Amino acid sequence: MNVLFPMRADAETKMGGDTLQVKRYIAELAKLGIRGTLSTAPKLSLHDVDLVHFTNIDRPLDLAVHWRQVTGKKIPYVISPIHHSYAEIEAYEKAGRRSTLSRLTKHLNFLQIEKLRSLVRCAINHRNWLPYQLPLITEDLSQVQREILAQAAAVLYLNEREFLLARTEIGASEKNKNILPNGIEKIGLCNDYKTARDIDFLCVGRIEARKNQRSILLAAQKKGYKINLVGAVNQYHKEYAKEVLELVEKSGGKYHGVVDKAAVALLMSRAKCHISASWFEVASLVDIEAFMYGCSVICSVNGGTQEVLGDKAVYCVPNDIESIARALEMALQKPQAVGSEREMIFPTWEAVAAQLSTVYQRAITDV
């Protein structure tokens, strides 16, 4: 079986959780004899493609460009929406961003913002996409989103919260609903790391306003805590990143830059606590990974982590520095997860791929 994964224009140059998700799918599906190909080109090559797996309903212009090419060709498709709360995104645009562009975007709704942002991204870095996106700019993107979800052979939500948001904000249906969480790396299972926990607080994630590192550092400053920071700088948030890195240095923390998976694993095994306080998420992989490595985990109330970790994590409100400060203090006092707790609730990527292959076979059979 040949499966095509068309993705947003910048999926390879601005890698995020969606890129990781697709690459892990492709790697594990290959072991099952399913060939997956990731494409960020505007024009798709559909020769010998048995099934298309779309992602990112919240990048509707990029998605619509690809979807239009597939419809009418009798090629079945599934979609992983990776749908974020529009209310949380709009709150971020109003209060979380601190840029010239935010003065405009805070007056727009999500789909208006996304049209503007997509054209800017293409004009700057992906001009080959412009001829494909411009004809769609006057379309009702909410209607396009509804059609994409309704016509999919299967819609693969990461958690129940994502489905409920998609039903409320887009009009998703129960009929093709599937819950398929992300997997975890096998290395995280059944390991009680003996490394000394010599780092109080670790924060792993791309340095950008959405991830809210500035508020984390200001909250830590109130308590006299030091933060170890890991992640690439978002090229569109350079001023924000500059302020964040200055705060890290001033507080006596450390910025480790971009490191490989093994180095992240080692840092997590050394950390007493891991914190993320994003303005919006669907399902934060880094929260789960940190928990698997034995950290006491602090998560944003925005996102699906509560559905998975429940009372095993501490939660904070992203736009409330006092809330983040209290969460830091609580996490440092919270016992770290023992091996038996960490093993019980997370599928491996191998298990996820097995479920995915079943969905694919059903989609092809039902055509």
Image: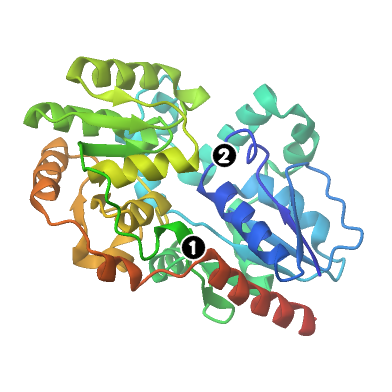
Q: CA distance from mark 1 to mark 2?
A: 16 Å
Q: Position of residue 43 (x, y in %)?
A: 83, 45
Disc 1 designates what residue?
A: 182
Element carrying mark 1: loop
- In the image, taking residue 155 as reference, residue 240 lies left or right, namely left
Q: Quadrant of the C terminus?
A: bottom right
Q: Is residue 75 above or below residue 251?
A: below
Residue placed most toward the observer, 18 or 355: 355
Residue placed most toward the observer, 23 or 241: 23
- In the image, taking residue 78 as reference, residue 230 lies left or right, namely left
Q: Which residue is found at the position 24% from the left and 66% from the top? A: 310
Disc 2 designates what residue?
A: 15
Mark 2 Cα shell of 10 Å, populated few (<14), some (14-19), many (≥20):
few
Model colouring: rainbow
Q: Amino acid at mark 1?
A: Asn
Residue placed most toward the observer, 148 or 194: 194
Element carrying mark 2: loop
- In the image, taking residue 200 as reference, residue 152 lies left or right, namely right
